[in-house]
Image (cartoon, rainbow, N blue to C red):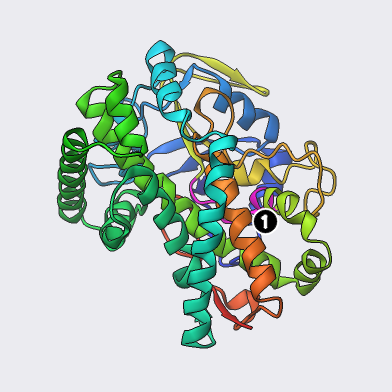
Amino acid sequence: MLNYPIPNPAPLDPPAEWADLRTGCPVADVRLPSGDRAALLTRYADVKQVLADPRFTRRLDAPDAARLTDSESGGVFNADMAARIPDSGEEHQRWRQQVGRWFTVKRMTALRPGMVAMADRLIDDMVASGAPADLKAALGFPLPVWVICDLLGVPDSDREKFAYWSDTLLNLTRYTEQEIAAAQAEFVAYTGAHVAATREAPGDDLLSALIAGGDLSEAELVATGQALLVAGHETTANMIGKMVGMLLADRSRWERLLADPSLVRSAVEEVLRFDADPGLGMPRYLAEDAEIGEAVLPRGTTVMCSMGAANRDETAFTAAAEMDLGRKPNPHLAFGAGAHSCLGQALARTELQVALEVLLRRLPGLTLAVAPGDLERVEGLVVGGLRTVPVRW
């Protein structure tokens, strides 16, 4: 039985097991860090089916659901935050419609000039400090934090707090049970106080609009604020670093973008598809018997959807093992599928595009300051990531 996540020392390349599993055992029995068993899906069609199938729920607190870790908290998927956001049906659609109107492509386009200006300022600071620099710390982390804080009306001066609280939710191996409980209590208290202050003095931000709408309960407002702070910076911060690492690992990729900047949008989509370090994937709990591919899974099965493995499936993508910066169409599953696809995907795409456009314009000579194979993964993080991205210019 395989241990999952699959150990992989290569920072930018996928584990060899992905291809073997897709062809030989697409529904595999795996052991989670907790010691519990789950079914791992690696084929594109199977992963897409499960992510869009309402029989596979986000509720991982069922008595017979697998524990992701041996801690009582279970991380982000079992946190109170997740339980307070409606999981399915009309309630989920109500919540999604209320929040989703703030993450439209049109609204993100309006935010783009501010993102560009902030990216330029961050690069100014990085250049002034001199090379080598950690691009993740200099640009990858502060840019999305500034954006999500602005959207929620919270001060980005608290970003170190958000980073710590987020990490306790997203890292399955780093913290003790006591550290996690204390951090999450602080996070709930902070967000609750911010919701109360916003109710008293509303502004032009997402939480103010949600409060004015009156459709979300206090618990839902707090949980929504928490979820957006976590998802709004941690995933994109790591993805900016991985994107630059992938593009600079093979200099011809960077040179192609310099020669044709119109490829930035398709390049971002290809980077999302090509990501070999997407983290844990998406867990789902099966509330009734279901057939997946050639396998019948019984009620109570916990399924791990490996979007990274699915995005390398040769049956879904021509030359799937190659990075094609102009690939179209590119129906990757990096943002999931169906009713639970990532609500903030337009925001994430815009931030990635802006980061890449500004780097190409400002630092065309950008290179990695270490060999690609010497980049280090962050261990235990649900969303994957590189510890640092050392660069020169």
Disc 1 is placed on an element classified as loop
Q: Is residue 203 magenta?
A: no
Magenta part mainly helix, strand or loop?
A: loop
Q: In which quarter of the image is the C terminus?
A: bottom right
Choose top left, top right, bottom left or bottom right for residue 214. Answer: top left
Looking at the image, which is closer to me, 249 or 307? 249
Give the side of residue 26 with respect to residue 57, left or right.
Answer: right
Q: Is residue 299 above or below residue 180?
A: above
- Where residue 257 appears, x then y in whole percent? 78, 64
- Where residue 237 appears, x then y in whole percent? 48, 58
Q: Is residue 162 above or below residue 290?
A: below
The magenta span reads 271-280
Q: In this view, does 62 lie above or below 194?
A: above
- Where residue 210 appears, x then y in whole percent? 32, 28
Choose top left, top right, bottom left or bottom right for residue 329. Answer: top right
- Residue depicted at 75% across the width and 71% down the height: 250
